[in-house]
């Protein structure tokens, strides 16, 4: 299974943009999704200049309950169907728990946990009927370890891993793969970082991690990588 048509969330920058570039370079058809239409348009032009083919894109607020089904409908209209979903969109803040306001708490849960669940909920009936599909969730190595000052973010990553692992066991006999990717610290713009400023031995480069993620789509049909943990060799883990 080649998984030709791929939907990527959080694709306007950082790891999501790197995944989109890698997918397009592999010849796959891609729909980029994020909240910023301006940034998505820029990524699409960049990928078109690189590959000669413009990817589709759709701006959507996945924190909203209707965002997932809106995005799935847009992706189906653009691509004619979806073979794989890469849930990459996420937010988080490094600060004490009590300094998070209620809107921030709601937003981190809505985008990091509820949005992947809603997207999968919209896609799975068709995949089950077809007997094929691939769900890849970008979580974090914090899915299995605590970290002070990021409690809401860590909670969503624990939840994402638990949901995906349970879902995998529920549908693995239906021809559908589920993988949770758990990277260590990434050299990206997440949490106000500046991409390209970190030593690669201490922070994962987005292009290198993207190759690992996209490589999952070429796994033989009889194999599944249910969890993939990736760390920089000198990272904190």
Image (cartoon, grey):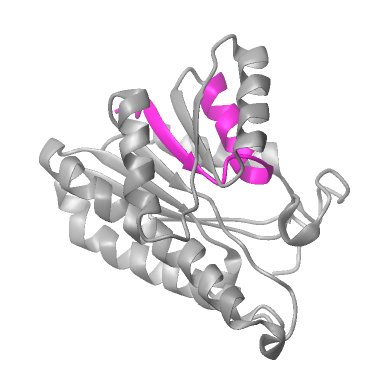
Residue 177 drawn above or below residue 219: below
Is 89 within the magenta? no
Compared to residue 132, the image places residue 183 above or below, namely below
Q: Residue furthest left?
A: 129
Quadrant into which the C terminus falls: bottom right
Q: Count the labels in the image.
A: 0
Name the quadrant containing residue 99.
bottom right
Q: Is residue 21 magenta?
A: yes
Residue at image coords 67%, 38%: 208
Q: Nearer the viewer, residue 61 or 223?
A: 61
Decide: is 98 above or below 131: below
Image coordinates for residue 25, horizontal then vertical, percent: 57, 20
Q: Position of residue 112 (x, y in %)?
A: 50, 63
Please tell me whether residue 193 is drawn above or below residue 155 in the rendered image. Answer: above
Judge left or right: residue 186 versus residue 176: right
Q: Which residues are magenta?
A: 1-25
- Name the residue located 59 percent from the left edge and 66 percent from the top edge: 141
């Amino acid at each position: 299974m080649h998984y030709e048509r791929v939907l990527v969330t959080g694709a306007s920058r950082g790891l999501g943009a790197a995944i989109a570039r890698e997918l397009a370079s592999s010849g796959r058809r891609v729909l980029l999704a994020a909240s910023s239409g301006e940034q998505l348009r820029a990524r699409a032009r960049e990928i078109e200049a690189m590959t000669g083919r413009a990817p589709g894109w759709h701006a959507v607020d996945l924190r909203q309950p209707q965002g997932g089904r809106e995005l799935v409908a847009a992706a189906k209209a653009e691509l004619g169907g979806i073979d794989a979903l890469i849930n990459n969109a996420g937010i988080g803040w490094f600060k004490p728990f009590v300094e998070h306001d209620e809107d921030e708490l709601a937003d981190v849960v809505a985008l990091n946990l509820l949005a992947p669940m809603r997207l999968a909920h919209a896609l799975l009936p068709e995949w089950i009927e077809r007997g094929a599909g691939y769900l890849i969730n970008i979580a974090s190595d914090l899915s299995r370890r605590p970290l002070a000052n990021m409690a809401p973010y860590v909670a969503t990553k624990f939840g994402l891993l638990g949901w995906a692992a349970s879902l995998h066991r529920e549908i693995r006999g239906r021809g559908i793969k589920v993988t949770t990717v758990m990277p260590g610290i990434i050299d990206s713009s997440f949490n106000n970082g500046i991409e390209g400023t970190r030593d690669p031995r201490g922070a994962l480069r987005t292009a290198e991690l993207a190759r690992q993620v996209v490589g999952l789509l070429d796994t033989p049909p009889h194999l599944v990588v249910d969890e993939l943990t990736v760390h920089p060799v000198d990272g904190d883990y």
